[in-house]
C-alpha cells in the first residue's frame, strides 16, 4: 500500500489593525501571536527536517509584522507596557488592569504563580476597575506589564534561550530595566519570523501560500447574490453592485507582495474563509495561482452530495474527498483540495483536553485508516488527506502550548512509512487532479454558506455603509477632486474595510470582549475615506453597528424546577430552566463538527443544583455509541470541586464529589441525562456564584466539553427567588 499523503495547511492570519491616518493601533495580536505562534509553529517544523507542510501567510499579517520589526509600528498594549510603572496615569493603569489579563486562564495565567496571583487580586467579573486599582502596588503593576508579555512567549523559546529561561524563573519583582530587556527580546523574536519562513521554504520543507491581501470574501465582492446559492431566502443588502475590480486588485496585490517578500510567486492560495464560487475561478487563475483549498462541504455541494457524511460522521465515497479536483471556467482552471473538517476540528477543539502523546497517535491512526479504506479504490493514486486550520488560535488551549502534541505528531508522521507528510504543491505536481467539478458551489468553510458575513442585519448594514463610501470614492476619482496620493490612501482604506474579520463579529454567531473595538475600527476605516476625500463623513458612521453587545453564553433560570431525576425529557419540569446551546464560543475559531452534547438545561430547586444534558438523539444510546463512561462537572467556583458520574451502561449511576465515598446526588440517563446535586454537599449558600463546565470522557480521554472554553455561571437563589422575580 502506498503511504498516505498527509497535507498540513496552517493558515496564519490577522486583520489589519492600525489606523494609518492617526498611527493608532488598539490591538496587540500580531505582536503577541508573533512571539508565541508564528515563531513557534515555524520552529516546530524546523525541528523535524523530514517533515513537510504548507503555511499560508496573509499579507495583512505580514505587513504589520514588518512594521514592528522596522520600528514603525506599535500598539496601545505595547505603549502601556513600556511606560514606567511608577509614572502611569490613572487612565493607563486602568487600561493595564482591563487588558493585561488577555490570555487563557488555565494554560497561560494559572501555571505562572505571580501572574495568577495578580489575576486573583484583580477579581475579574466581581470588582470594577476603579475598585480594583487601589489593591495594586507599583511592583504589582510592573510585574503585570512583564507577565502580560512573557506569557505570550512560545515554550520552546525558554528551552533554547537560557537568559529568557532565567528571566521567567525570577517570577516577580521585576525592574524597569528587566522589563525593557524583555520587550527588546520580544522584538528580537519578531524579527526572526519572516527569515525563518524564508529558510524553511528555501530548504523545501514548507510551501508558502497567500490569501487576497486584506482577507475579503471574494464571492461577495464579486456578487452578493451568490449568498443565495446556499441560502435561497437570504435577505441581501440594499446595494448589490459588483466590486469585482476590488476582488481582482486584492488578488493582484497579494501575489505581488508575496513575490517581493519571499522571492518566489505563490502557487497556492487559501481564499479568505475558504470562500469560493464558480465566478471567481478565472480571477484567481489570472494572477498565476495554480491551486486553492476549501472545506469538504463545498465538494459535497458541488458534486450533488456524491461525497457526504452520514448522521454518525462517516464518509460515503471517502476516496472522492481524499484526492485533488479540477475546477474550470472556460480555459482557466485551478486544482482544488478539500479539508477533512472532522480531523481538523480534532486538533482545533478536542485534543487540547487529551493526553497529548495519545492524541497524536490517535490522529495518525485515523490517517492510516483513511489510507487502508481508500487505497484499494483509488486507482493506484496515493490518498491525499488535507488538514487545514488556523495556525495560531488553538494552541493557547493546550496546557503546554501544543509542544508535546506537535512534536509527537511531526516526528511520528515523518518516521512512519505508512504516512508521507507533503507540501501540497509537490503532491499536485506528481499526482495532478483528473476529476472535474462541473460547477463550483458558492460558499465558505463554515456550513458551505456565507451566513457569518452577510446573513444578519448588522452584516448587511456594514455592507451598505461600505457601498456608500465606495461610491463617494469613485465619484472623487472620476472628478479628480483629490490628489493621487490621497486617492491611493482612500482606496487602501476601502480594501481594508472589505476584510472578512469586521463582518465576523457582527450578528449573533461570534463575540469577544473587544466587539465594540472591532465595530469602531471598521467604521473608522470608512470615515477615513471621507476624510481623505475632504468630505464630511455621514453621521451614521458614528453609530455602532453592533447593537446587541456580546451575546450571553446561556439564559438564566426563571423559577425553581420541579424535577424528578429519571432520564425522561419531561418538558414542564424544565420550563423555567436556563439553557445553553452547544456551539463555538471561541471568538476567532469555529468548529464545524458536532460534539456529543447539544444542549444543557440548568437551574435549582430548594435543595439541589439541577442539570439536564441533551444529545442529538437519545442520550443513553449516544453515550453508548461514543463510548462515554464518565461525566465530570468541574467547578471553577467554588474552586477545587469536581463531581464525577460513572456507571453508564449499568442499572444505577454513581455520583461522587472529589472522589468522596458518599453520594453527592442522583443521576439518570435515558432520553436525556439528568443530574441533581445537593447544595449542602457543595457547601454553598444563597448568593454564592457557581462557575462550572460539563465534560465527557471515554477510556480516560476527554471527548467533549460544554461550554468548550468558558463556564456556565449561576447564582444560588434565595428561598423567595420566585417571589422576587414575580415582583420584578
Image (cartoon, rainbow, N blue to C red):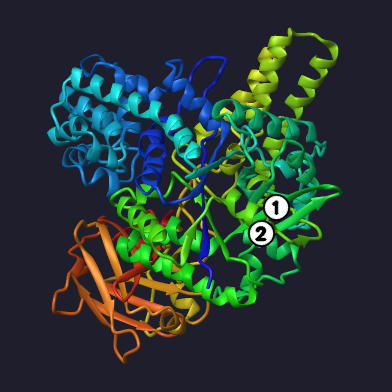
Could you say whether the residue bearing mark 1 is in a helix, strand or loop? strand
Could you say whether the residue bearing mark 2 is in a helix, strand or loop? loop
For label 1, count other residues whose C-alpha is less than 10 Å away and answer few (under 14), some (14-19) or many (20+): many
Q: Quadrant of residue 433?
A: bottom right
The foreground one among 312 and 372 is 372
Q: Are marks 2 and 1 in contact (CB under 8 Å)?
A: yes
Q: CA distance from mark 2 to mark 1?
A: 7 Å
Residue under the point 60% across and 48% down:
425
- Residue 364 placed where, x, y %? 42, 66
Marks counted in the figure total: 2
N-term-proximal mark, 2 vs 1: 2
The answer to whether residue 496 shows anywhere in this view is: yes
- Residue 47 placed where, x, y %? 34, 46
Residue under the point 24% across and 14% down:
87
Mark 2 — residue? Answer: 324
Left or right: residue 174 compared with residue 301: left
Mark 1 — residue? Answer: 335
Residue under the point 68% across and 42% down:
217
Amino acid at each position: 500500500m502506498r503511504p498516505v499523503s498527509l497535507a498540513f495547511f496552517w493558515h496564519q492570519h490577522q486583520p489589519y489593525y492600525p489606523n494609518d491616518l492617526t498611527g493608532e493601533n488598539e490591538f496587540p495580536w500580531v505582536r503577541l501571536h508573533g512571539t508565541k505562534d508564528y515563531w513557534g509553529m515555524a520552529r516546530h517544523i524546523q525541528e523535524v527536517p523530514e517533515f513537510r507542510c504548507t503555511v499560508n501567510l496573509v499579507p495583512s499579517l505580514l505587513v504589520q509584522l514588518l512594521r514592528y520589526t522596522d520600528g514603525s509600528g506599535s500598539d496601545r498594549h505595547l505603549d502601556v507596557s513600556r511606560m514606567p510603572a511608577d509614572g502611569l496615569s490613572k487612565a493607563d493603569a486602568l487600561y493595564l488592569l482591563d487588558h493585561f489579563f488577555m490570555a487563557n486562564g488555565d494554560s497561560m495565567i494559572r501555571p505562572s504563580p505571580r501572574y495568577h496571583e495578580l489575576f486573583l487580586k484583580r477579581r475579574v467579573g466581581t470588582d470594577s476597575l476603579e475598585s480594583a486599582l487601589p489593591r495594586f502596588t507599583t511592583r504589582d503593576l510592573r510585574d503585570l506589564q512583564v507577565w502580560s508579555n512573557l506569557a505570550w512567549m512560545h515554550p520552546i523559546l525558554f528551552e533554547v534561550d537560557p537568559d529568557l529561561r532565567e528571566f521567567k524563573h525570577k517570577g516577580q519583582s521585576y525592574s524597569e530595566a528587566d522589563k525593557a530587556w524583555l520587550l527588546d527580546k520580544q522584538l528580537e523574536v519578531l524579527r526572526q519570523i519572516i527569515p525563518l519562513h524564508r529558510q524553511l521554504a528555501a530548504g523545501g520543507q514548507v510551501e508558502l501560500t497567500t490569501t487576497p491581501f486584506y482577507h475579503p470574501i471574494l464571492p461577495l465582492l464579486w456578487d452578493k447574490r451568490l449568498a443565495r446559492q446556499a441560502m435561497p431566502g437570504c435577505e441581501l443588502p440594499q446595494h448589490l453592485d459588483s466590486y469585482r475590480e476590488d476582488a481582482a486588485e486584492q488578488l493582484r496585490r497579494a501575489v505581488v507582495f508575496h513575490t517581493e517578500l519571499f522571492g518566489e510567486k505563490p502557487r497556492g492560495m487559501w481564499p479568505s474563509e475558504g470562500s469560493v464560487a464558480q465566478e471567481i475561478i478565472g480571477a484567481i487563475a489570472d494572477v498565476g495561482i495554480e491551486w486553492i483549498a476549501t472545506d469538504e462541504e463545498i465538494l459535497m455541494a458541488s458534486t450533488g452530495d456524491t461525497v457526504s457524511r452520514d448522521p454518525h460522521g462517516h464518509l460515503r465515497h471517502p476516496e472522492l474527498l481524499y484526492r485533488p479536483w479540477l475546477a474550470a471556467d472556460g480555459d482557466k482552471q485551478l486544482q482544488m483540495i478539500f479539508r477533512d473538517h472532522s480531523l481538523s476540528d480534532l486538533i482545533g477543539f478536542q485534543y487540547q483536553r487529551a493526553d497529548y502523546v495519545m492524541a497524536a497517535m490517535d490522529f495518525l491512526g485515523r490517517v492510516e485508516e483513511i489510507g487502508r479504506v481508500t487505497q484499494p479504490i483509488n486507482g493506484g493514486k496515493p490518498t491525499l488527506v488535507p488538514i487545514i486550520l488556523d495556525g495560531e488560535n488553538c494552541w493557547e488551549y493546550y496546557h503546554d502550548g501544543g509542544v508535546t502534541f506537535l512534536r509527537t505528531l511531526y516526528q511520528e508522521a515523518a518516521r512512519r512509512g505508512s504516512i508521507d507528510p507533503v507540501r501540497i504543491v509537490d503532491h499536485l505536481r506528481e499526482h495532478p487532479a483528473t476529476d472535474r467539478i462541473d460547477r463550483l458551489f458558492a460558499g465558505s468553510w463554515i456550513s458551505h454558506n456565507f451566513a457569518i458575513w452577510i446573513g444578519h442585519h448588522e452584516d448587511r448594514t456594514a455592507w451598505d455603509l461600505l457601498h456608500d463610501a465606495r461610491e463617494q470614492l469613485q465619484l472623487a476619482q472620476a472628478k479628480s477632486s483629490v490628489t493621487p496620493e490621497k486617492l491611493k490612501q482612500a482606496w487602501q482604506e476601502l480594501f481594508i474595510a472589505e476584510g472578512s474579520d469586521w463582518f465576523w463579529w457582527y450578528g449573533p454567531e461570534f463575540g469577544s470582549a473587544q466587539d465594540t473595538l472591532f465595530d469602531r475600527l471598521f467604521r473608522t476605516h470608512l470615515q477615513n475615506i471621507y476624510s481623505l476625500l475632504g468630505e464630511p463623513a455621514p453621521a451614521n458612521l458614528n453609530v455602532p453597528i453592533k447593537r446587541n453587545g456580546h451575546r450571553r453564553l446561556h439564559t438564566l433560570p426563571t423559577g425553581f424546577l420541579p424535577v424528578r431525576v429519571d432520564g425522561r425529557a419531561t418538558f414542564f419540569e424544565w420550563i423555567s430552566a436556563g439553557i445553553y446551546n452547544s456551539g463555538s464560543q471561541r471568538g476567532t475559531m469555529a468548529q464545524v463538527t458536532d460534539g456529543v452534547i447539544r444542549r444543557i438545561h440548568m437551574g435549582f430547586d430548594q435543595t439541589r443544583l439541577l442539570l439536564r444534558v441533551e444529545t442529538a438523539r437519545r442520550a443513553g444510546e449516544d453515550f453508548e455509541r461514543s463510548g462515554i463512561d464518565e461525566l465530570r462537572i468541574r467547578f471553577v467556583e467554588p474552586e477545587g470541586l469536581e463531581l464525577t458520574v460513572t456507571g453508564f451502561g449499568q442499572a444505577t449511576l454513581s455520583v461522587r464529589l472529589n472522589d468522596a465515598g458518599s453520594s453527592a446526588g442522583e443521576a439518570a440517563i435515558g432520553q436525556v441525562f439528568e443530574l441533581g446535586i445537593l447544595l449542602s454537599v457543595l457547601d454553598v449558600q444563597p448568593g454564592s456564584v457557581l462557575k462550572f463546565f460539563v465534560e465527557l470522557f471515554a477510556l480516560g480521554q476527554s471527548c467533549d466539553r460544554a461550554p468548550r472554553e468558558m463556564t456556565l455561571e449561576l447564582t444560588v437563589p434565595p428561598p423567595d427567588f420566585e417571589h422576587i422575580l414575580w415582583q420584578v
